[in-house]
Amino acid sequence: MEPTLLGHNRTGSGLNPGDTQLMLAAVSELSPPGRISTRQSDAERISYITDADSLGSIPPPLGASPGASVETASSLTGVSPTVFFDKLGERIAFERGSTRLYEALIAKYVALVDSDGAGLETLQRIRSEELDHFRMLCDVATQLGADPTAETPSGDVIGTASMGLLQVVTDPRTTLAQCLNAVLTAELTDNAGWELLTELARAAGQDEVAERFAEALADEEEHEAIVTAWLKSLVTDAVGTPAV
Amino acid sequence: MTLDLMNEKGTPAAQQLMSWKELAGKPISKLDDDAFTRVRIILMNGLELDSLRTKQVALRMNRDARVELAELMRAEHQQATAINWLIGADHSPLETTIAYEQVAIEVTASVAQLEPDAYLAQAYRYALLEDFDHLYRYSALLDRLEGKDANNIVQGYTDIVPARPTVVHHRAPEHDLLRPYERNAALATKLHALTLTGGEYQTHDYYMTIGPLFADPLARQLYAEIASVEAQHITHYGSMINPDESPLERLLVGEACEIWNYAACLEQETHPRIKALWERFLDYELGHFQVALRLFKDIERRDPAEVLAQTQLPPRIEFRGHREFLRETIARETALRKDGTEFVEEGKEGRTSLEYRDQVNADGSPSSAVSETYSWAPGTELARPDLAA
């Protein structure tokens, strides 16, 4: 793949000033600019939000009697069990997705940079830690009576939110730097997610679980630092290479 | 529910219009609603789109029916929109694909058991084993690309295992054809063929639309490969239909087909809001049938009884998991192949299919590559207990 270079990008209106003038003349005659208003769209969206059903629910704990709610069937105290299991499901979905995201990033690195060496080892280690986090979360969910295979509403939402990141990293045309930018978004979100989940575990009096979460948070802080530094290094020191 | 096609008047076509907001109503819940509610939604969207297709052909071939057909198409289009918009945006395109394959599997399994013609029942089982394999290949992609468990969609009703491998689904065109049913075939036979043709058409068109939206090159290859098989399935099921039927005859049977399917949905739906929609659209279709009946009598000057054979609708599709039937069929018929319109043993497949396959698989098999070593496990293969450190 070629590096990002100057070329024949056709998207800007500045490239064809004559056509742009003709377009503006048409606008002036047929849809002259006035005060900008999105009032009707806003009202429509608000109406849908007011009327909407939720994305879904949290399943009752495993083994709970039929019809039991999470709130009554869970032994968790100090936090809302519904919120805790929803956020736990979010992290399960995210860590599992991140494992796959790093697999895609590793393919990119091998194709564009090196099929060996320290960079690859770092990426493989991070991917392995994401997988460890996923499996640890599944253990914790099971230990607390939740089904780790259930998709919770926040797990569903984080899947939707991550789709753009996945599209960036799996596109054969993107550079390593562009992919690292997408992965940085993931890592920043991941750090905030682990901080919140660790706090919730502490509030629930689940000290041993909170400790395991804090260890995962420390890993993620390192991942974020690595990705941030790597991205900075590429855009300053590797301009003109296929990685940028 | 007993419906007498000749005597149920339904909702008059003039009273069937909906506003844009009604068309873009509340979607179902991906997480909480039963998988078979989504199965019915996808199936009925496919049938509505196929009914539009049938009517467009009839429009081009009937000067005297143009106004009525245009009116019917306006209603059918609105129905298709209201139904298709029930799928929530938190379904990724690949998750919706999993749902499409579940529709193909469970609906075809039911139809295969209902079909009175032994040859056509074989044909349903044949393509069923291919859609069943597609579910396995797409599930592997969902797991390995998006990190998601296909069972969040199929909800334990449908097994996620290989059947006849997708890599051998590719046949030369002449081997996709079937012997059509006779003109005096049972009404059930006609309804089954139309239902599956519409379903496969929709699946093909969906894959052709979303395939290029993926960035991942393997996903793009897999959609290209399976869309091609779905195109074969349109021919497979479409060639069941008697080619001597007139467009207005097909219109009449098509309206009966929609009634039959909406009645099945209404009888088995567990979601109150969606059940009310099926009831409303069943009444719409009964109204459409009356228009089709009038056109058939006035323009073709024929007795509807010679087309419908019976006016009581046959037994309905059963919307449920058909696990045992599927396992038996996989065990018995995975090795079957096609030679012209006939089903043959593996070594007797039509030679031109082997040549065609050599060409399309020349650069590798996307469906094989994406599912290499794949075994479904609860929570994705990353959660497999045997992989614990």
Image (spheres, coloured by chain):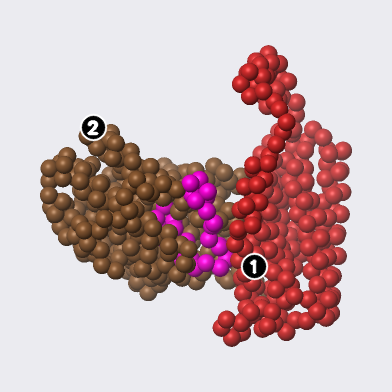
Q: Which residue is mark 1?
A: A152
Q: In the displayed structure, does residue A15 sit left or right of residue A68? A: right
Which quadrant of the view contains residue A215?
bottom right
Q: Which chain is brown?
A: B
The answer to whether residue B327 shows anywhere in this view is no
Residue beneath disc 2: B63
Per the rendered image, the range of residues in magenta is B19-45
Q: In the rendered view, would you say A24 is above or below B319?
A: above
Q: Is residue B14 visible?
A: yes
Residue at x 74%, y 34% (from the top left corner): A3
Give left or right: position of B126 versus A215.
left
Could you tell me which secondary element the residue under label 1 belongs to?
Answer: loop
Between B292 and B176, the one nearer to me in the picture: B292
Q: Is residue A218 magenta?
A: no
Q: Residue at x 28, y 58 (%)?
A: B192
Q: Position of residue B111 (x, y in %)?
A: 31, 63
